[in-house]
Amino acid sequence: MNLELPLAVICFLAPHVVPSIPGLRPWLVGKLGRAGYVFAYTTLSAITFVWLVLALLRAPYTGLWALSPWQVYVALMLIALACSLLVAGLATPNPLSLSVRAAGVDPPRAAILGVTRHPLLWALGLWGSSHVLVNGDVASVMLFGILAVFALGYMPLMDRRVQKAVGMKDWQRLSAGTSNMLFTAYFRKSPRPFVDRTLVLSVVGGFALFFLLLYLHGPVIGANPLGAIL
C-alpha cells in the first residue's frame, strides 16, 4: 500500500489543527512574534500542500465513476464560493474559528460571520468536495474526501472548544448573528447579517483567485478543469 498520500494528508492537516490546542497559539506567537508565526504557518501550509499535490499525482489511478459535464459545472461553482470564503476568512480576524488573525474574545464587526463563522473550514470543505465529485478515483476520494470530512466535521468541535473557553453566556453573545451552516443566519429576523466592504472585496478577490487557479490548473497540475465541457 502506498503510504505517501495518507502521510501527506496528516502533515497538511497538522498545521491547521495543532495551533487550535488551547494555549498553544499564544505561546507560539509569544516565541515567534505575530509576523513570525504567520510566516511559519503560511510557509509550512504551502510546503505540505505542495507535497499533498505531488503525492496525489504519484498515487496509482483506480477509477470509481465516469465524469459528466454537470459535475464540472457544480464543482466550478463550489470552488468559486470556496475561494471567496478563503479570502474573507484570511482577511477577517475571527476568534470563533480557525483564523490566522484571532482578535481576543470579541468577534469583529464583520459580515463574513453572518455568512458563516467558519469561512476557512467551509472553503476547505467545498474545495475537497468539489474535487471528489470531478475526479472519481480512489486516491482523490481518499485525499479530498478526508479533507472535506475533516473541515465539515471540525466545525461543531470548534464551536464546543470556544464555548468551553469563553463560557455559555459569552458564547451566546459572541455567536449572535453568526451561523455554522452557510447563509442560514440570513433567514433569521434578528440580528440581521449585513454586507460590509471586506465581504465585497473578498468576493471580488475570491473570483480573481478562482480565475487564477483555473488558468494555472492545467500548466501546474496537468489537468484542464474545463476539458469535459469544452
Image (cartoon, rainbow, N blue to C red):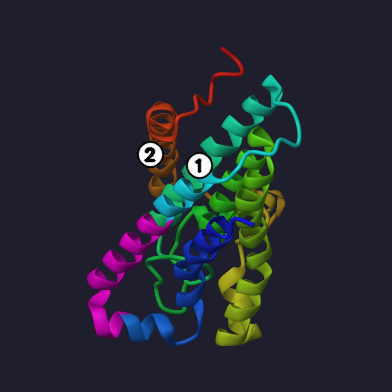
Q: Which residue is mark 2?
A: 205
Q: Residues within 10 Å of mark 2 (few under 14, many from 20)?
A: some
Residue name at image x 65 percent, y 33 percent: 134
Pointer 2 and pointer 1: residues touching (CB < 8 Å)? no
Magenta stretch: includes residue 30:
yes
- Residue 90, label in figure: none
Magenta stretch: includes residue 3:
no
Name the foreground residue: 42 vs 180: 42
Q: Which residue is mark 1?
A: 57
* Quarter of the view holding residue 130: top right
Q: Which residue range is magenta in the image?
A: 29-48
Q: Position of residue 197 (x, y in %)?
A: 38, 46
Q: Position of residue 31 (x, y in %)?
A: 26, 85
Going by the image, does 8 lie left or right of 173? left
> Comparing marks 2 and 1, which lies closer to the viewer?
1
Residue name at image x 71 percent, y 35 percent: 63
Q: Amino acid at mark 2?
A: Gly
Label 2 and label 1: CA atoms lie apart by: 28 Å
Q: Is residue 180 visible?
A: no
Mark 2: which secondary structure? Answer: helix
Quadrant the C terminus occupies: top right
Mark 1: which secondary structure? Answer: helix
Residue name at image x 42 percent, y 53 percent: 51
Name the foreground residue: 126 vs 97: 126
Q: Position of residue 214 (x, y in %)?
A: 44, 29
* Quarter of the view holding residue 207: top left
Going by the image, does 172 lie left or right of 25? right
Q: Position of residue 221 (x, y in %)?
A: 44, 35
* Quarter of the view holding residue 44: bottom left
